[in-house]
Amino acid sequence: MKGCQGCASYYRQMCQVSDGLLAAANEPAIDAPVALHSRMVQALRSLENARQRNWLEEFMPWSRCGVAVVTLAVLLGIVTLVFVTSSHPSITARPPTPAAGHAKTDLAPTISNYQMIANQSVEDLDELLTRQANLRRASAPSYTASSVAAVN
């Protein structure tokens, strides 16, 4: 080490560090004041509360905006639902029932009228079809070959 100045310098520095550590180990322990712990805890809690408040203050404008958007979406859905249901007739509405008696013969011979009567009673449908068949037969003109030749 005597031949290398860098090594000698390094050795002296290490000796100083070692002497300093030994001197520090021999000194008595230093007691901290009792109030130091409570002040440190209070300072840490106040920092934590400040962080929470800052986070809430940053979040609050967005949460208000979010609540407004959700409220608008719900109101739009309700208005749309009311408009759609009021503009279309109810599917479950039944057609008006015809009056009793011979008023059923006044119905036009259509499939929808026949379905309406059949939904009420199959016997009523049978009566209606029989009456309409008898009326058509009685009022229908009869054509014969001789009447067709006379027209030509």
Image (cartoon, rainbow, N blue to C red):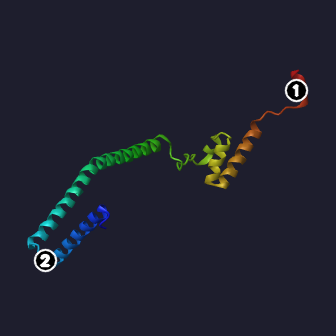
Residue furthest to the top: 152
* Residue 139 higher or lower than 71, as above or below: above
Q: What residue type is labelled 2?
A: Glu
**Image x and y of residue 101, in percent:** 60, 48
**Image x and y of residue 133, in percent:** 74, 44
Q: What residue type is labelled 1?
A: Val
**Residue placed most toward the observer, 103 or 34:** 34
**Image x and y of residue 21, in percent:** 21, 73
Residue shown at the point (68%, 47%) measured from the top left: 128
Q: Quadrant of residue 34?
A: bottom left
Residue shown at the point (45%, 42%) measured from the top left: 86
Location of mark 1 (residue): 148
**Residue placed most toward the observer, 47 or 92:** 47
**Residue placed most toward the observer, 38 or 30:** 30
Residue shown at the point (44%, 45%) measured from the top left: 81
Residue shown at the point (82%, 34%) measured from the top left: 142
In the image, taking residue 23 as reference, residue 79 lies left or right, namely right
Badge 2 crowding class, 10 Å Cα cut-off, few under 14, some 14 to 19, many 20 or more, is few
Location of mark 2 (residue): 27
Q: Nearer the viewer, mark 1 or mark 2?
A: 2
